[in-house]
Image (cartoon, rainbow, N blue to C red):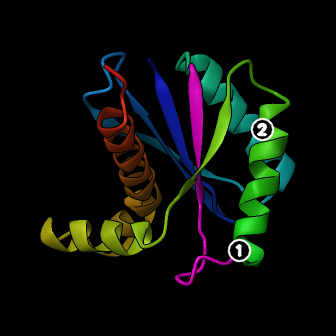
Amino acid sequence: MKIMSVDFGDSRTGIACCDKSEMLASPVCVIEEKDFNTCIQKTAALAAEHKAEEIVVGFPKNMNGTIGERAEKCQLFSEELAKLVNCPVKLWDERCTTVSAHNYLNVTNTRGKKRKAVVDAVAATIILESYLDFRKNTATL
């Protein structure tokens, strides 16, 4: 199944997709958009373009599991996105994905403007990899 993941941000939103076999998650792009509704529309257009059959939106819970302001905004984003696409939209716990993305970029020595341009797409890829691992580990036989 083609699954797209979204790392929603106020200025930059990372997008990643997997192949039909759900083996490889790859960064697609970063949407640079500050307007909430326009970002949702651009995300919906990318979902159509990439023929997404499911969308996973990062849900940044607090470390203690509570839902803060950022998570509420991501929840609203996913609800509004669901109105524009013809596939399920799910929230997926994304605690620490941005930190992991920065660690990956440290290993590859990606710095400065280039780092800023890709970190959100890398975070979206990590979200998708986590979701794909969950699907593999909970598949019914």
Contact, mark 1 vs mark 2 (Cβ under 8 Å): no
Mark 2 or mark 1, which is nearer the start of the sequence?
Answer: 1
Q: Magenta span has 18?
A: no
Number of numbered discs overlaid on the protein picture: 2
> Is residue 127 shown above or below 128?
below
Reading the image, the residue beneath label 2 is 81
Left or right for 49, reference 131: right
Quick one: SS at disc 1?
loop
Q: Report the side of 98 relative to 41 (left or right).
A: left
Q: Nearer the viewer, residue 140 or 134?
A: 140
In this picture, residue 93 sits left or right of residue 1: right
Q: Nearer the viewer, residue 134 or 8?
A: 134
Q: Which residue type carries mark 1?
A: Ile
Which secondary structure dominates the residues rendered in magenta?
Answer: loop
Q: Nearer the viewer, residue 56 or 46?
A: 56
Q: Amino acid at mark 2?
A: Leu
Whether 112 is drawn above or below 117: the answer is: below
Location of residue 38 in the rendering, given as x and y in whole percent from the top left corner: 81, 45
Name which quarter of the figure residue 74 lies in. Answer: bottom right
Residue 51: percent from the left, percent from the top? 55, 15
- For discs 1 and 2, the disc positioned in front in the rendered view: 1
Point 14% across, 65% down: residue: 108
| Mark 1 neighbour density, 10 Å: few (under 14) some (14–19) many (20 or more) | some
The residue range painted magenta reads 53-67
Q: Give yes or no for residue 59 being in the magenta stretch.
A: yes
Quadrant where the N terminus is found in the figure: top left
Instruction: Indicate left or right for 114 with 72 as reference.
Output: left
Mark 1, residue position: 67
| Residue located 50% across and 62% down the image | 94
